[in-house]
Image (spheres, helix red, strand yellow):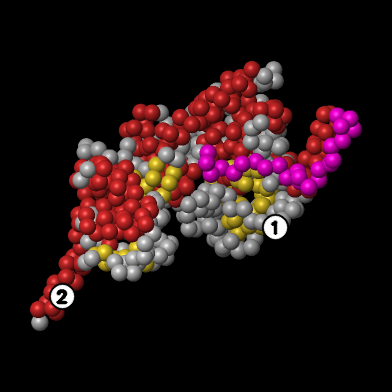
């Protein structure tokens, strides 16, 4: 009786429209309203259209996979029965992939001399502009118009949501570079497009949308196709350290497994839009050249031979396929995950548009500029430049990305050793610094005052009363009272970049109050901010613990000497 008023969303499909409106909402016993019937039908149509397209275009999806289309979260993949390690759950033909070589825009791309992500962006924009006339229409209709990466956020959202985080400056720099790419390489194409293609389909917004899809969904296929959009393979969601299924690209030229979107944390924070995307390389062999004899080969003949070589390479590569292979058992009903690599939240948000709470691969970067600002305010700019130069003479650098140099702090709060060494050198007494600088500059033997070996391996350095080991994984010896105090001050400067209006506790409370999917951008931004600020808190704890240990050792040493 209690359930008599519940509307079956599918019971009235064939009834006359006057009986029930297509905008009728479905009411569950709890009183919760869910998506209306029209939305359910739209997602069902999308999936049916995509499945028909796969069947017609050489994409074999196992019946053991269940594609689930959610209005808010998009398409995910679940196991419709128990899956076992080694099961091949999908076979994908290479011609079904949208690449520079398969797109109808290939001649436009070739004439413009574009490749890599630029060329693939043109291919994607071109096919989307064709609508239902595109050979990939059934695939493209299941993709979102764009992935909600920070790259496509407004400047206001970037400043209000990402200020102080690892991404704020990087995304702004990305946006400038991508706009320059569009103006220099894409805009000129709009004057020579085929008549059936609307030039507005190649606007800056469309380019950013295409870049967001390529950054988050493309795979490296092979040497001939380069990277491309791989239908079905790009529907598996990511879970850090929990790969269920593996994308394998088998080449007829060489056997290789291709990890879909592999990158490290630092690269991924800056990786995400251009630098780490694989470029397209033709597999036409340079060894198959011919001797050019004047008068014997016209330009047309040369072009024909080049085209024949490309076609031969294409046939060889397309004879092999792409597979999705289970690498662990998955129970029926569970979601089947791929993994995009071991990335922290800054990298995930930058390239894929989402974060993971309690991500063990989170890091925080401390810019070299923050360190030199602290040193210059504590001493002088000239003093700082000299000490920094000595640190570099010893063979040390920070991590480098685009136009910045920085130091990483792990999720445990342990700073990069190179940062501790720099702080130690910045705090050396003048006499110790001068002796060390002279010895390094003249390449003199340090047998009396100390000795130096390659900074890539541990070595001891003794200057007067100062003795420490550079290059050791154990940082205790570098954490003097002065270094600990300096590090805490620099961490405070790093935290101040988030602004003074909110604390870590405020961000945690804001995160709990978020309502998905409405607050999607705010939610993922807060996950990133909270993870970074927790690491900074860990740094303080790490430094204080080490300082207390050092103080205890000093007291014990003094007691032993006095006894």
The answer to whether one can see residue 2 in this image is: no
Return the x and y of residue 423 as percentages of the image width and height. 27, 54
In the rendered image of this protein, does residue 189 appear above or below residue 377? above
Q: Which residue is at the front of the view, 52 or 289?
A: 289
Return the x and y of residue 341 as percentages of the image width and height. 51, 53
390 left or right, relative to 246: left
Label 1: how many Cα within 10 Å (few below 14, some 14–19, many 20+):
few
The range drawn in magenta is 274-298
In the rendered image of this protein, does residue 476 appear above or below residue 80? below
Residue 293 falls inside the magenta stretch: yes
Question: Alpha carbon of mark 2 to alpha carbon of mark 1: how far?
Answer: 61 Å
In the rendered image of this protein, does residue 33 appear above or below residue 333? above
Q: Residue furthest bottom?
A: 563
The residue mark sitting in front, 2 or 1, is 2
Task: Give the residue displayed 25% in from the left and 46% down from the top.
Answer: 383
The numbered mark at residue 255 is 1
Task: Give the residue displayed 23% in from the left and 65% down from the top.
Answer: 464
The numbered mark at residue 556 is 2
Magenta segment, prevailing SS (helix, strand or loop) = loop
Q: Which residue is at the front of the view, 479 or 413?
A: 479
Dot 2: element: helix
């Amino acid at each position: 009786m209690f359930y008599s008023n519940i509307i079956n969303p599918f019971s009235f499909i064939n009834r006359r429209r006057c009986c029930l409106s297509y905008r009728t909402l479905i009411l569950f016993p709890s009183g919760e309203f869910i998506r209306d019937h029209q939305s359910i039908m739209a997602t069902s149509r999308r999936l049916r259209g995509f499945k028909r397209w796969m069947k017609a275009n050489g994409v074999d999806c196992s019946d053991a996979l269940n594609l689930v289309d959610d209005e808010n979260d998009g398409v995910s993949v679940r196991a419709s029965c128990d899956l076992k390690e080694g099961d091949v759950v999908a076979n994908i033909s290479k011609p079904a992939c949208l690449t520079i070589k398969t797109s109808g825009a290939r001649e436009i791309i070739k004439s413009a001399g574009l490749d890599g992500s630029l060329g693939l962006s043109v291919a994607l924009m071109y096919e989307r502009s064709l609508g239902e006339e595109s050979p990939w229409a059934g695939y493209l209709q299941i993709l979102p118009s764009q992935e909600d990466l920070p790259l496509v956020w407004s400047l206001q959202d970037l400043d209000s949501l990402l200020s102080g985080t690892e991404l704020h400056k990087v995304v702004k720099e990305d946006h400038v570079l991508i706009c320059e790419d569009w103006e220099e390489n894409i805009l000129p194409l709009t004057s020579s497009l085929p008549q059936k293609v609307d030039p507005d389909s190649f606007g800056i917004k469309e380019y950013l949308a295409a870049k967001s899809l390529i950054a988050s969904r493309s795979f490296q296929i092979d040497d001939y196709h380069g990277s491309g959009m791989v239908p079905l393979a790009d529907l598996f969601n990511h879970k850090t350290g929990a790969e269920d299924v593996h994308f394998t690209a088998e080449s007829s030229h060489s056997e290789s497994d291709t990890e879909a979107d592999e990158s490290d944390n630092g690269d991924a924070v800056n990786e995400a839009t251009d630098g780490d995307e694989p470029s397209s390389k033709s597999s036409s062999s340079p060894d198959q050249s011919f001797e050019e004899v004047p008068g014997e080969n016209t330009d047309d003949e040369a072009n024909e031979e080049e085209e024949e070589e490309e076609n031969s390479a294409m046939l060889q590569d397309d004879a092999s396929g792409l597979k999705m292979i289970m690498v662990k058992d998955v129970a029926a009903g569970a979601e089947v995950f791929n993994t995009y690599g071991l990335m922290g939240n800054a990298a995930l948000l930058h390239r894929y548009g989402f974060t993971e709470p309690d991500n063990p691969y989170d890091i925080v970067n401390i810019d070299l500029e923050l360190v030199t600002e602290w040193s210059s305010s504590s001493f002088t700019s000239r003093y700082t430049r000299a000490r920094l130069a000595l640190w570099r003479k010893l063979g040390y650098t920070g991590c480098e990305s685009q136009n910045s140099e920085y130091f990483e702090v792990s999720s445990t709060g342990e700073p990069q050793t190179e940062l501790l060494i720099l702080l130690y050198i910045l705090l050396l007494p003048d006499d110790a610094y001068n002796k060390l600088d002279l010895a390094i500059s003249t390449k003199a033997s340090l047998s009396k005052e100390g000795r130096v070996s390659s900074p890539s391996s541990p070595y001891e350095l003794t200057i007067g009363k100062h003795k420490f080991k550079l290059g050791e994984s154990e940082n205790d010896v570098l954490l003097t009272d002065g270094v600990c105090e300096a590090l805490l001050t620099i961490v405070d400067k790093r935290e101040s970049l988030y602004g003074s209006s909110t604390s870590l506790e405020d961000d945690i409370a804001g995160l709990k109050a978020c309502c998905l999917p409405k607050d999607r951008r705010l939610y993922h931004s807060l996950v990133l901010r909270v993870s970074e600020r927790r690491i900074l808190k860990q740094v303080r704890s790490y430094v204080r613990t080490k300082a207390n240990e050092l103080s205890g050792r000093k007291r014990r040493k003094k007691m032993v000497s006095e006894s």
